[in-house]
């Protein structure tokens, strides 16, 4: 799915206000953002760490994460026109959509050269420290929902950030990277057995994110595959660095 609006709705349990906000936002998405949105529903009682990272003070709160810059909407979520006027900035939406399309185009070319079956581009949100999937090829909703937001400690891509180097997982079943049965099960269900990732860095060495190639069988990349991934990472980094001034990823606009 080509996502143009990525929204996060923060709620608190099953309170009346939470139920009403959920119904209002779902109606908004169905009537005005159909087939061009992704909605994450987050209960702050179950996932308080995300509420802290997004600096959520009151609930219900709706956050537009993509396109950048993020926008936080609090208060009454019953007015669809008010919400749409807040989250749909034509200029920013155009830039965000362009970035998504270019990243996906570059990713597809890199996958073909590296012989990969699937791929993701995760960008680093410096405010929260989370890696977020901004472009992908080959994955279904279950995988994307599980891995859409990852901390630096939870994945091979996090290891690539920590070491600032490529990370190769020849067989995920034998790798210590995937702790616990759940992430391993999600990977296997998605048809992943091996992966190869590289950090995206600016010319000054600042980290922008991670690009990852996935393989359906245990695989040790050839030197040509490693070169293809490194070249892809440089291309993506150069493109993102050029957009950096147009798409600030750490700002947060609040609409009350």
Image (tube, grey):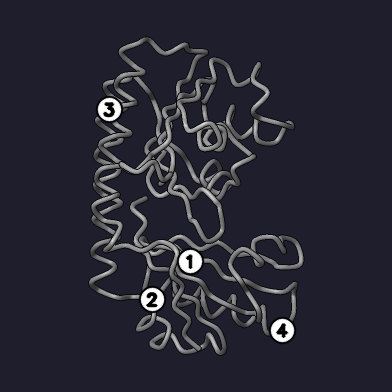
Q: Residue 239: x, y in percent?
A: 24, 46
In primary-sequence order, the first of circles 3 and 1 is 1
Q: Are marks 2 and 3 in contact (CB under 8 Å)?
A: no
- Please identify, in this view, whether the residue under mark 3 or under mark 1 is nearer the observer: 3
Q: How far separated are the C-alphas under marks 2 and 1?
A: 9 Å
Tell me if mark 2 has few (under 14), some (14-19) or many (20+) residues whose alpha carbon lies within 10 angstroms of its own: many
- State how far apart marks 1 and 4 are (Cα): 21 Å
Label 3 Cα neighbours within 10 Å, binned few <14 / some 14-19 / many ≥20: few
Q: Given this view, does label 4 or label 3 mark the residue nearer the observer?
A: 3
Q: How far apart are marks 2 and 3 (CA)?
A: 35 Å
CA–CA distance in space, label 3 to label 1: 32 Å
| Picture residue at 51% right of the left edge, 89% below the top | 256
Contact flag, marks 4 and 3 (Cβ < 8 Å): no
Q: Name the residue under label 3.
A: 231
Give the residue pinned by disc 4: 16
Residue at left offset 48%, top offset 20%: 216
Cα–Cα span, label 4 and label 2:
25 Å
Residue 122 coordinates in the image, percent (x, y): 44, 44
Among the two numbered marks 1 and 4 on one chain, the one whose residue lies closer to the N terminus: 1
Report which residue position mark 1 lands on. 7
Q: Position of residue 252 (x, y in %)?
A: 46, 73
Depicted 88 relative to depicted 140: above or below: below
Towards the viewer: 215 or 159: 159
- The residue depicted at 29 percent of the width and 34 percent of the height is 234
Q: Mark 2 points at which residue?
A: 87
Q: Alpha-carbon neighbours of circle 1 within 10 Å: few (<14), some, or many (≥20)?
A: many
* Marks 3,1: beta carbons within 8 A: no
**CB under 8 Å between callouts 1 and 4?**
no
Q: Do the residues labelled 2 and 1 touch (CB within 8 Å)?
A: yes
């Amino acid at each position: 799915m080509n996502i143009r609006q990525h929204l996060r709705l923060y709620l608190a349990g099953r309170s009346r206000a939470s139920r009403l906000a959920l119904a209002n936002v779902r109606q908004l998405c169905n009537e005005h953002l159909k087939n061009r949105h992704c909605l994450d529903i987050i209960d702050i009682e179950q996932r308080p760490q995300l509420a802290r990272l997004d600096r959520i003070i009151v609930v219900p709160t709706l956050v537009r994460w993509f396109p950048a810059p993020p926008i936080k909407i609090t208060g009454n979520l019953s007015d669809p026109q008010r919400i749409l006027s807040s989250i749909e900035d034509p200029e920013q939406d155009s830039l965000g959509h362009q970035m998504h399309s270019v990243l996906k185009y570059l990713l597809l070319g890199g996958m073909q050269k590296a012989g990969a079956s699937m791929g993701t581009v995760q960008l680093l949100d410096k405010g929260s420290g989370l890696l977020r999937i901004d472009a992908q090829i080959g994955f279904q909703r279950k995988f994307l929902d599980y891995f859409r937001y990852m901390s630096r400690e939870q994945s091979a891509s996090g290891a690539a950030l920590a070491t600032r180097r490529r990370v190769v997982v020849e067989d995920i079943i034998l790798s210590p990277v995937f702790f616990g049965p759940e992430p391993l099960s999600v990977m296997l269900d998605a048809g992943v057995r091996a992966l190869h990732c590289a950090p995206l860095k600016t010319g000054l060495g600042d980290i922008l994110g991670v690009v990852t190639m996935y393989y359906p069988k245990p695989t040790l990349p050839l030197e040509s595959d490693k070169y293809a991934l490194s070249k892809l990472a440089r291309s993506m980094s150069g493109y993102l660095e050029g957009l950096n001034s147009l798409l600030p990823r750490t700002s947060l606009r609040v609409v009350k």
